[in-house]
Image: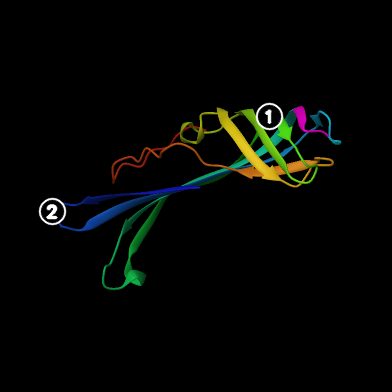
């Protein structure tokens, strides 16, 4: 999740005006993972998943009231929640020295379609990951959420619409 507030002051009225932008990005993905899941110290694996991507962006213009927060003036410029399709490919190695706790090291390439620029423009090359946990017996589905990028806020008074 990413939230950003841009504050400006109106030179004529001396009011403080804030533009508040909130966004979220989440993926529900499902797919097979191939590789040894039995006993062993080093267990390489590769996987491919299809994903349902959920994202939303909302932008509000707020004239805050410093003495009573309930009296603020708020106008919603944009509030969109969408779903999209994507896929990913993973490559990694489980390090399992005692067959009780694993250390999972690897990388993931993620592709999402019809996602706005500030959420990665539809693709991202995930940085290498490091994960520890109990041994995996069978991986059916995993859920991951992430947000990336910065919000480019338009100037106050200029509502812009980004094509999705």
Residue 12 circle label:
2
Q: Position of residue 75 (x, y in %)?
A: 38, 55
Q: Secondary structure at mark 2?
A: loop
Residue 33 spot, x, y in % from top left? 79, 31
**Residue shown at the point (76%, 28%) measured from the top left:** 45
- At x 33% / y 65%, what residue is drawn? 72
- Is residue 78 shown to the viewer in this render? no
Q: Please identify the residue farthest to the right as the structure is shown.
A: 38
Q: Does residue 51 sit above or below 100 in this rendering? A: above
Left or right: residue 74 versus residue 164 is: left
What is the C-alpha distance between the residues marked 1 and 2? 51 Å
Residue 43 among magenta residues? yes
User: Which residue range is magenta in the image?
Assistant: 40-45
Please provide percent x and percent y for residue 150: 41, 38
Residue 151 seen: yes
Q: Determine which of the numbered discs, if any, sits on residue 87 in the image.
A: 1
Above or below, comparing residue 36 to residue 67 in the picture: above
């Amino acid at each position: 999740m990413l939230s950003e507030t841009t504050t400006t002051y109106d030179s004529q009225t001396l009011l403080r005006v804030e533009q508040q932008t909130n966004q979220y990005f989440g993926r529900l993905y499902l797919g097979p993972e191939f590789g040894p899941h039995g006993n062993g110290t080093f267990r390489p694996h590769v996987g491919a998943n299809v994903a349902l991507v959920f994202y939303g962006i909302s932008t509000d213009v707020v004239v805050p009231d410093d003495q009573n927060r309930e009296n603020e003036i708020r106008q919603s410029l944009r509030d969109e929640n969408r779903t999209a399709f994507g896929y990913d490919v993973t490559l990694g190695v489980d390090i399992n020295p005692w067959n009780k706790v694993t250390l999972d090291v690897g990388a993931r390439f993620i592709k999402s379609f019809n996602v706005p620029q500030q959420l990665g423009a539809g693709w991202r090359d995930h940085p290498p990951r490091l994960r520890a946990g109990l041994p995996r017996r069978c991986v059916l589905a995993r859920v991951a959420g992430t947000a990336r990028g910065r919000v480019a806020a338009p100037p106050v008074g200029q509502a812009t619409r980004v094509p999705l």
